[in-house]
Amino acid sequence: MAEGDVKVDQRPIVERPVPKSKLSEEEKEEILTVVTQEEYADLPPTQIVPKLADKGTYIASESTFYRVLRGENMQHHRGRSQKPERRIPESHLVTLPNQVWTWDITWLGGPVKGLFYRLYLILDLFSRKVVGWEVWETEEAKHAETLVKKAVINERIQGAPLVLHSDNGSPMKAETFLSLLEKMGIQSSFSRPRVSNDNPYSEAMFRTLKYRPDFPHKGFASLEEARQWAQQFVHWYNEIHLHSGLNFVTPVQCHKGEHVAILEKRKDVYEAAKARHPERWARGVRNWTPNEQVALNPMRDEEQTEVLRKP
């Protein structure tokens, strides 16, 4: 090698003696055998090592146990404590009314503190129309059964494919209620446990309801008063309220399919206004295209991949 040349670093290829403290493969196997035994499967090394010592056995230190477990990806969930499975929310995509309904129950204040009435309400996912509602004094599966029956009859969709999505409340999961859905050919769908935003359309509806200027925050004087107010609200919501999620048509207009012509006419009005005064329009006219599909809990790309990987 000429003078001044830089020598290649030899350290990566130098043979080094095996550390005297290194565990043998037999000792590693012994550690792995011990930590998976029923007696030790749920214990950390800080408890396993002393317990072994009390029996006259010493294999390695606590830190060595931890290092071996990390190397085998066994530091957690060796026993009954299994790694929690990530639950993917149920996802639905609709293109027409009466394909998926969502429903929930909200409490309405009564005449005295601690007394509440229950508003049961079913919402069509595509049109956001309230297709069924009732107010009762209690939360019971029999009330939910009555409501679903009436909604199906009113919508004239007996026997048609339908998904009914809800949270995990006791009325929603009652055996009699689920049995009714099965008999009617309705597929049940549920939010994930302890996840509040898997039923966002019903939650948004109740938020709109309780922020109405005439909502009696101090409570309703009677069950009859609560029912009268709910009836007025549903009429306003379905037939008067221009829903922002529907490009500002009413839920009834969307449910009946009238929204397509309404939005087309609205677009023509805007384009005519721009043609009269183009100098007043820096951009194109507002997008009045009707919704072609609505998704409930759409899956992200990584969730779709996870579903495809499952057997």
Image (spheres, rainbow, N blue to C red):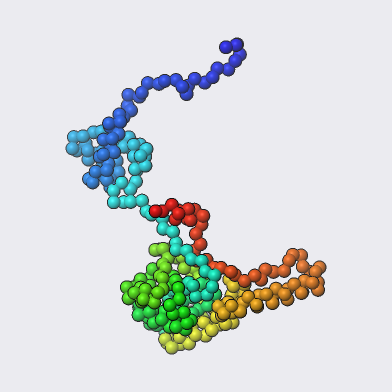
Q: Quadrant of residue 153?
A: bottom left
- Would residue 105 be found to the left or right of residue 81 on screen? right
- Would residue 164 be found to the left or right of residue 19 on screen? right
> Would residue 79 be seen by someone viewing this image from the given angle?
yes
Front-lying residue, 214 or 118: 118
Front-lying residue, 4 or 178: 178
In the image, farthest residue toward the left: 55
Front-lying residue, 187 or 53: 187
- Would residue 191 be found to the left or right of residue 63 on screen? right
Image quarter hosting the N terminus: top right
Q: Quadrant of residue 14?
A: top left
Residue shown at 63% from the left, 75% from the top: 260
Residue 110, image x, y percentages? 42, 82
Residue 307, image x, y percentages? 44, 55
Q: Is residue 305 above or below residue 298?
A: above
Q: Is residue 277 above or below residue 11?
A: below
Residue shown at 52% from the left, 69% from the top: 94
Q: Is residue 235 above or below residue 26?
A: below
Residue 174, image x, y percentages? 33, 73
Residue shown at 45% from the left, 54% from the top: 308
Residue 196, image x, y percentages? 45, 65
> Would residue 47 be seen by someone viewing this image from the given angle?
no
- Would residue 282 be found to the left or right of residue 161 on screen? right
Residue shown at 39% from the left, 63% from the top: 193
The number of numbered discs placed on residues in the rendered structure image is 0
